[in-house]
Image (cartoon, helix red, strand yellow):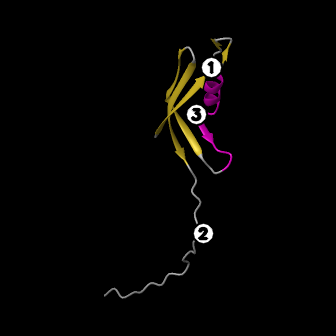
Amino acid sequence: MADAGIVLHYPQVDGIYQPISAEPLRKLLRQKGYSFRGQSGGTLIEIDSSTFRIWNDQRDRTDITFRFTYQVTVPRQPETKINVFEIERDWT
């Protein structure tokens, strides 16, 4: 389990901050069930939806925090398999 934080800094136009909505991110996460599989490499990220928080109480940014787990596919080298077993029977 790991913690993550994302900060969306608002652009400033004529001295006024222009808020960026976090709603598209929230909608995407709900659609995907808070789970994402990478397109290459076999990485899987699962976000704990109970820890997903969005704070927009700052005038110049939105803070997003959550906990997540990830799984990575580790390639294994091919190994020769043992197909013949020799059993000695001397059970006296």
* Real-space CA distance between mark 1 and mark 2, rounded to the nearest whole angstrom: 50 Å
Earlier residue among tags 1 and 3: 1
Q: Are marks 1 and 2 in contact (CB under 8 Å)?
A: no
| Vertical side of 70 occupied by 34: above or below | above
* Real-space CA distance between mark 2 and mark 3, rounded to the nearest whole angstrom: 34 Å
Type of the residue with mark 1: Tyr
Type of the residue with mark 3: Tyr
Earlier residue among tags 2 and 3: 3
Structural crowding at the residue carrying mark 2, measured as other residues with C-alpha within 10 Å and reported as few (<14), some (14–19) or many (≥20)? few
Task: Give the secondary structure at mark 3.
Answer: loop
Residue 24 highlighted magenta (yes or no):
yes
Structural crowding at the residue carrying mark 1, measured as other residues with C-alpha within 10 Å and reported as few (<14), some (14–19) or many (≥20)? some
Q: Residue 10 got which mark? A: 1
Seen in the image, is 90 located left or right of residue 47?
A: left
Residue farthest to the front, as pictured: 15
Residue 55 position in % (x across, y down): 52, 19
Residue 88 position in % (x across, y down): 41, 86
Range covered by the magenta-colored residues: 20-40
**Residue sitting at x 44%, y 84%:** 87
Residue farthest to the left, as pictured: 92
**Residue sitting at x 58%, y 75%:** 80
The C terminus: image quadrant: bottom left
Type of the residue with mark 2: Pro
Seen in the image, is 82 located left or right of residue 88?
A: right
Q: Which residue is mark 2?
A: 78
